[in-house]
Image: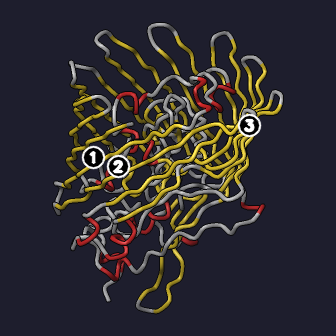
Amino acid sequence: MRTFMQWIRPGAGWFLAACLAANAGIANGQSATHAGGTSSRLQWATPAPLLVDDNAAVHHAGDFMRVAAAAEPASRDALFGDAPPKNARDALFDADAPAARASPRLSGFIDGLAAYTYADPTHWSRAVARLQLTGQGEIGNGVKWKLSGRVDGDPVYLRSGFYPDAVKRDQRVDFFYRENYIDFSAGDWDFRLGAQQIVWGEVIGLFFADVVSARDMREFLLPGFDVIRIPQWAARAEYTAGNAHVELIFIPVPAFDRIGKAGSEFYPVPLPSPAPNDVLQIFRDPQRPSRSLANANFGLRANTLLAGWDLAAFYYRSSSTAPTFYRLPGESPAQPFIVQPRYDRLWQGGGTLGKDFGDFVLKGEAVYTHGQNFSVADLTAAQSVVGRQTLDYIVSAEWSLPGDSRVNVQGFQRYYFGGGAGTLAIPNDGVGASIFLSTKLGILEPQLLWIRNLKDGGGLIRPRLSWAAARNITMSVGADVFTGPSDSFFGRFNNRDRLYTEVRYDF
């Protein structure tokens, strides 16, 4: 049997397996600007900074930044969202919404997206239809509830001869729980119990401070964040005193990123396309931590307004939401090793800031991560991973211009402690930048998102044109173009460039 390395593209070598171990390190942040939130912590298969979310900007997807998920919002509102309420109680319980909530109401969306990968080998990669339903109401005595779920179906994965059977079974039909919780208050304390989105970030388009959220990464960061984000089953308490508040969270059974099966379109390791069976057999399903109190997640966040600055600090103890790929001994001489995705136990501390200067809005985030492992290209290293502490930070400035136009510019960087990034399979260090442009031309809305690591040259370009076809109906066409070397966060998908069209109806 040919070895795993013989199947890898020339020059990639152990990079594939090592990249798997790196498993992120790029995106790990989020922005409170969106309803969903985004953060960006740099990493590859493990956490790293990335793209935009409903309440955030970018999320960690690897070692550089997870830009794709937020890069393709259904609309400008989906990308930027409304500014988060300044009052913590309002943010948690939507206190500024109409009081008519006492009577139950139903909302949701229907979304259809077809994508064609035009990079060699060409193939249809998506034809997904989504239906999400959300019910909200009030039981009485100030107790509010929310129930929601979504179903996805994709005929591409029913009979496709391009993808392995395991991939087709994993992606042809999906049922998702969304936010399902109850809210209640006791004195100055507000509580939320159940599956919920917890957004701690402030920037746009990238995930840095969004350290709590899990994500469905099977389509990388390309879907909108209302699709990609996975709620956490948590107990959440918030204490508000004037302009300051403290937030406590406890997650007894954490949710983790869904990375799909080996051979899928955006599997964290850049396998040949399509991948041979003896290569696919090397990769195992992720090994999740056992359900115990010792493996529970918990965190604390506090913020206040000071001289016009919105300042926050947080501490979070958890298992990484994105797995690191470990190389382990194989089961036979013909298979000398296997690759096992695992979740590292880590702690994170960081902060966010924001201020409206009138002409523009300034935001920033910084996150220090301790306990994260990354894949290395050295086969002699134990399990082909190495521990590194990281500091990720981002600064964002946004201008609202005449003609209902927006410009957002961001600069970010990841720094490694304890040995640097020289031996990592996907280094994703160095300075990066992103720019988002949007305007409205009648019923048309052109957008452009561009993200680039200035050190390794990897990047993502996402032009999009949306048409407000009717009330609550948006039709869009666009492209997702990956650039850079195959050992960069974005460049590993440089044979996944695609064109797509999308129709969405919100009700």
Q: Which x, y percent locates residue 392? A: 55, 39
Q: Are marks 3 and 1 in contact (CB under 8 Å)?
A: no
Q: Which x, y percent locates residue 123? A: 18, 61
Q: Which x, y percent locates residue 290? A: 68, 69
Total numbered labels placed on residues in the image = 3
Image quarter of residue 411: top left
Q: Is residue 473 above or below residue 399?
A: below
- Residue located beneath label 2 in the image: 490
SS at mark 3?
strand
Kindly identify the amino acid type of the residue bearing the numbered disc 1. Thr
SS at mark 1?
strand
Residue at 64% across, 52% down: 233
In this rendering, position of residue 164 left or right of residue 316: left
Q: CA distance from mark 1 to mark 2?
A: 6 Å
- Residue located beneath label 1 in the image: 483
Instruction: Choose between 353 and 149: the one closer to the eye.
Output: 149
Q: Is residue 117 above or below residue 145?
A: below
Image quarter of residue 355: top right
Q: Which x, y percent locates residue 80? A: 43, 28
From the viewer's perspective, is the residue at label 3 or at label 1 nearer? 3
Residue sticking out furthest to the top: 358
- Between discs 1 and 2, the one toward the N terminus: 1
Quadrant where the C terminus sits is: top left
- Residue located beneath label 3 in the image: 184
Instruction: Choose between 208 and 439: the one closer to the eye.
Output: 439
- Between discs 3 and 2, the one toward the N terminus: 3
Residue sticking out furthest to the right: 187
Quadrant where the N terminus sits is: bottom left
